[in-house]
Amino acid sequence: MKLIATLLVVLVCVSAAPRNPFDYSKKRSLTAVMAEVEAKLNNKSPLDAILNVLRDFRDAVNTEQVNHDEIYNTQQAECASENEFRSRQVQDAQTVLRDSTAALNVCNTSKIRTTNVQEVNQQQYFSAQEHLTSVLTAAETEAGYFKRRGRDYEDALHAIDEAQDILATIYSGSGSFAEISRVSKSMLQTAFNIKETAKFAPIFYAFAQLAAQEGQLDESALERVAQLLDTLRSNIQEAYNDYTTSNAASVAAFNDQKERIGQTIARLEAQNERLQNKLTNLVQCIGTQSAIAQTASGKLQRNQQLWDQAQTLCSTFANEYNYATQARRNELQLVAQLEEMVAERFDQVEDENHERNQRLASY
């Protein structure tokens, strides 16, 4: 009975060990084996009969372990294949997502930079247009001013010519100093208009002297006035020529400036067209790379989830295998202990029978 009690204690300890829900040992009844061993012990069955029960149990455990090993190896191969496939899919998706995201960032950055450049280009274009308008307006104003000033110079020359004619009539005796007074007013007005009063001052002084000497004039005085008029006319004509030359230079400068501004406007228009084409391409790039990145992100998420699920399942397979294998080891250890205990018990019984027989023989 001590042997049976000991076996029950061991059985309770083994049964108390945690078992995986997939533990294959549940198909066997260790309790039934223990009951059969106990029955054979009580019936004083041969040792081999009892050990055969335990050997059959051990063989069943070993066979079950071999079968589970084969299943587990197949599971491991499938897990390795799935891990390799999902790892490759995740890596491919990460590569595509990385490259498309980098390209998308480049396109976005380039679009922002190109938009800024286009805004600057448009501002320069508007400024050039305003500049051209200002230049054309200034040229038109300058042309009008030249025409007016040209007429003023021509009026001044005409007034000088008229004064010379009047002076000639006075020299011939048919002219009047009243005509000199009239033409002096006209000359004074034109002198103010062309801003050459300093050059007219000597002739006005000479006219004043002639007016003061009316009736007492000599030919030498008239000749001096005539020379002053000739000198004045030469000076005014020279000034008129200089003004005309200066205006011609201004017109040439205007034409050159107008041409350069026109070239600038044409260049800005061409650049704006190129920038607009570039922006169109960049918008297409952003759309394409966004679609690629979105697809790659979905692929990455999907394969990562499947990979995680596969790893979880493979971890379950491993836990199931480890728990079941450990449970079978425990069962084999128990069987080995039982075999030792049964053998010891039989040895003890034989010793007791031998001593009893010797005591009986001594009487």
Image: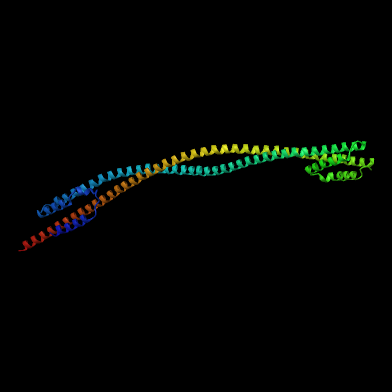
- Viewer-side residue, 244 vs 199: 199
- Viewer-side residue, 172 vs 26: 172
Quadrant of residue 18 within the rendered picture? bottom left
Identify whether 335 is placed above or below 193: below
Residue drawn at the location 32% of the way across and 45% of the way down: 76
Does residue 193 appear in the picture of this structure?
yes
- Viewer-side residue, 181 vs 204: 181
Does residue 340 appear in the picture of this structure?
no
Quadrant of residue 5 within the rendered picture? bottom left
Residue drawn at the location 59% of the way across and 38% of the way down: 271
- Viewer-side residue, 164 vs 283: 164
Q: Quadrant of the N terminus?
A: bottom left
- The percent position of residue 73, horizontal first and vertical second, equals 30, 44
- The percent position of residue 255, horizontal first and vertical second, equals 70, 37
Residue drawn at the location 35% of the way across and 42% of the way down: 82
The color scheme shown is rainbow
- The percent position of residue 176, horizontal first and vertical second, equals 89, 39
Query: As drawn, which residue projects farthest toward the bottom?
Result: 363
Q: Quadrant of the C terminus?
A: bottom left
Quadrant of residue 203 within the rendered picture? top right
- The percent position of residue 136, horizontal first and vertical second, equals 67, 38
Q: How many marks?
A: 0
